[in-house]
Structures are given as structure tokens and as C-alpha cells.
Image (cartoon, rainbow, N blue to C red):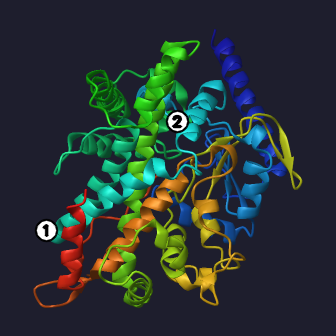
Amino acid sequence: MPALWADIVACIVALALYLHIRRVRSYRHLPPGPRKLPFIGNLLDIPTSLEWEVYARWGKEFNSPLLHLDVGGSTLIVINSAKIAIDLLEKRSSIYSDRPDFPMLVDLMGYGWMMSAMHYGEPWKERRRLLQRHFHPSNADVHESKEVEFTHKFLVRLLDSPERFLGHIRHMAGGVTLSLAFGLDIDPDDDPYVKLAAEAVGTLTEAAIPGAFFVDVFPFLKYMPSSLPGAGFQKKAQVWRKQMETFHEEPFAAALRKIASGTAEPSFTSLCMDVISEAKNPEQQMSAVKDTAGMFYAAGADTTVSSIDTFFIAMVYYPEVQLAAQRELDAIVGRSRLPDFTDRPHLPYVTALMKEILRWQPVTPQGVPRRVMEDDIYENYQFPAGTVFIPNAWAMLHDEEEYPDSLTFKPERFLKDGKLNPEVRDPASLAFGFGRRACPGSHIAQSTMWLTFASILSTFDVTAAVDKNGAKILPQLFYKSSIVSHPLPFQCTIKPRSSIAERVIRDTLMTH
């Protein structure tokens, strides 16, 4: 009997060594990367903070725009190059548009309905078509009026309680997306739906980070009872799943009630419901509408918040940029009214400032992972089907060849002879994703950002907060690790530029 057990153990060891040798041999056809340990590969190397900067540094250390990581037997490729991201994720989008499995996010937390987590297939295509049909870039009237309304209300809140500006930003961004998606009224303070989105999206973006939870590396752990030691992720998932269910159901149910009562404002949900009875499968279409509205609500609110937070940090650190933008606004708009979208073509510096916000601190510094659906070859590298790719947008947007002095905030890098320079790559082409998985609402995010920045700069001065001794308190340039990255909470001083600016803000609000 002991001899039998010895034979079994020997076979197991031999099989493990054989599989390990096969994996090591496969490395020869993959990009370079950190040294792999037997069996676990680079599992212990996965960064847990500022991943995008670590991957960019590794790219320089290995002198390669592509990096290979072996994570528990799974092949992970980090793309640090814009050219390669376009070559693979756009030009070969027919096989690079899938998502990997997300055991924590989808199986345990229940976010399988989110477009960004869906596998590439008909359900995803159906939801994408719904978004594009209603929020097509050529149909600016659908969203611009709501952006104007909530931006003007935001300016009044900055006047009344500037110290609460971070909350006001979230309220404004959440208000725009809630109104566009569901046609819901927004409470003046502490709106429950805005709070719900903040809580749910916070957990969602945390769970979507590659390698954040061991269950994503070893999917069999999802069957592990929550009572066992080391199963803390199961308890988190249970709590977060309840948040998800509330987030997914309640705003849509409220929208349906308003539609039924005849009090609903036009929105994505109301317009879709007007034609749902004509669908071949109304129940399936109803589910698609609910999922798509929820996705728009989640993605739009959180990403816009991050960008506006970064704007305030940039104005504190770069007062000369603020002054240059204010000079342009004063010359074109004057001080007797607020800027509007008709001014946009005549304010190139403000537009360049917005582009630099997208580049300097991208909202999604590392993109949502992709999965190649079949074997592929690129520049002598062989990627087996199922290989997962992470586009490192931060590295691409800090490429010194494309954006010299990349760590410095310089809107003028996008200008030439006082006009936008088309020869400089638009950071939006990298910051909002690639190919078929690029953000379909990026034009709405950019128009909201532009109007917000122009309106603040026209009416307020943003400076560093000071302590009791009069010393400046500068925000930390440290961003939280998540798919949608946010700066740590910070302070700044926000004051109206003049009594005229204050009067313009209050008078404009009266027109809404």
C-alpha cells in the first residue's frame, strides 16, 4: 500500500513538472516580463497600488511596449503602447472585443447585466445599439440642455457652500445621468439615487481590478463557503450584491412609475418604453432597457466626477493655466453671461485644458481587460485564445515622444498658433477605450466636462486652501486603485471672481 501511494505522489509531481515545463516553454513566444515563480507565476508581483505606473515602469525596465504576466496559469498581457492597442483592439476588434470572466464581479456580486462586464455577443450588441440609437453623437440636443441645467445649479451650490464642492460635483454629475437615463427628479441635497450610485459604483470599480481578489485568479474559490477562514471575499460579495440589486432595480422602477402616471420627463427609459410594445420579445427588450439605463447611469456619473475632481486639483497646482483660460473666456464670453455650447468653437484654450485633464490623470488609467477569442500572432508573439489584455492608458498618455514633459499639466501642448493642433493625438482616443468596446457616451462626458470647466473658470477663482498659519495645503497627487480612479479627498478655496459673477450665476438660475 505505501508503494502505491508513493507511485501516486510521484505521478502527481511528474504531471505538475510536465505542466510547468510546458508553461515555461510557452513563454518563449510571449513578451518579456517579471521572473515567474513555479506554479504561481507572477501572482505575487501583481501591484496593488498605482498599477498603471508600475506597468509603465516595467515596460521601460524590459524595454518592451508589451509585458507578459503569468497569473496562476492565466496569460496576461499589458499593452503600454498606443500603436499596439490600436493594432490589436481596434484593427482586430473582431477577435479582441471579448471580456474575460469576472468571478467576483459577475458570479458573486451579480453584475452580469453590466455592458462593460458582458462577453462579446448578441446581448451586449443589443444594449450597445440602444445606447447609440438614443445618445448618438449627432443628436446633441438630447443631453446638452440637461448639462446646462445641472451645471448652473452646481455653480449656485459652489456659491452657497464652496467647502462642500466634492459633494456638489457628485450631485451634479449624478443629476445629469439620472435625468438622462431615467427622467427622475433630483433632490437638492443628499439625493438617495446619487448616493446609491456612488456606493454601488465604488464597489463595482474596486471588484473589477484584475487580481484584486484571489477568486478571479482561482475561480473555483467562488464555491467556498463564507464561514471558512479566508473567505472574507464571500461576505463582501453578499453585501455588495444587495447594493447591486437596489442600484439595478430602484431607479428603473421609479422611472416606470412616473411613466405610468404621465409625469415623466423625456429620457432614455421613457423613449425606449414608447416603442417596447412593438418589439418581438417585449420582456427581453424591457430587460435590455433596464440594463442599458443602469449602465449609462453608473458609468457617466462616476467618470465625470473623477475628471472634475482632477480639474480642481490642476487649477490649484497650475494657477497660470487658470489665468490663461480666464483671459480667453473674458475676451470671448465677457463677464455679463455664462458660457454656453455656442462658444465652444471660439475657446480653444478651454478645450485644450479639457484634453489635458483627460491626458494628465485619465479616469480609467488601466482599461477594462479584453480577452482574445482565438489564437493570434503579433510581431512574432503568439497569443493563445483566452489571453487577457490590459490596455495601460496611463502609459500611452504619458508617452514622452507623443506628449513631452508628460507629468506636467500643459494645455498648450494641444495648441498651435492659437488653434487646436490636429497633429497632436487627441487623448480622448485613448482615454475612453478602443474599438468596439470604446465608451459610447464619451461625447456626453466631454461636453459635460467642457461646460463645467468653462463655467467655473468664467465665474470663480480656485486656489489652494490654507491652514491656520497661512501655509498652503496642496492636494495629494495620489489616485485610488480602481477601474475608475479618483483622487483622495482634498481641500481648496473657491471664491467668485467678482460681485458681477455672483449676480450672473443667480440670475441665470432663475431661468431654469
Question: Height in image: 9 above or below 485?
Answer: above
Task: Tell me which residue sits at (41%, 89%) in the image.
Answer: 327
- The quadrant holding residue 512 is bottom left
- For the question of whether residue 478 can be seen, the reply is no
Disc 1 target residue: 160
Query: On the rendered structure, is 512 left or right of 326?
Result: left
Report the amino acid beneath label 1.
Asp
Residue 506 position, x and y percent, is 18, 69
User: What residue is at 26 percent from the left and 53 percent from the top?
Assistant: 171
Relative horizontal placement of residue 27, taking residue 350 as reference (left or right): right
Classify 139 as above or below 384: below
Q: Residue furthest front?
A: 511
Percent x, y of residue 345: 55, 73
Name, please, the residue furthest toward the top: 1
Q: Is residue 384 above or below residue 315?
A: above
Q: Mark 2 belongs to which amino acid?
A: Asp
Helix, strand or loop at label 2? It is helix
- Looking at the rendered image, the quarter that the N terminus falls into is top right
In percent of width and height, residue 248 lies at: 36, 29
**Could you tell me if residue 342 is visible in this image?**
yes
Q: Residue at x 34, y 25 (%)?
A: 228
**Cα separation between marks 1 and 2:** 46 Å
- Most foreground residue, 254 or 270: 270
Can you tell which quarter of the image residue 185 is in? top left
- Relative vertical location of residue 310 with respect to residue 444 in this rendering, above or below: below
Q: Nearer the viewer, residue 371 or 331?
A: 331
- Between disc 1 and disc 2, the foreground one is 1
Picture residue at 18% right of the left edge, 46% below the top: 187
Residue that label 2 marks? 216
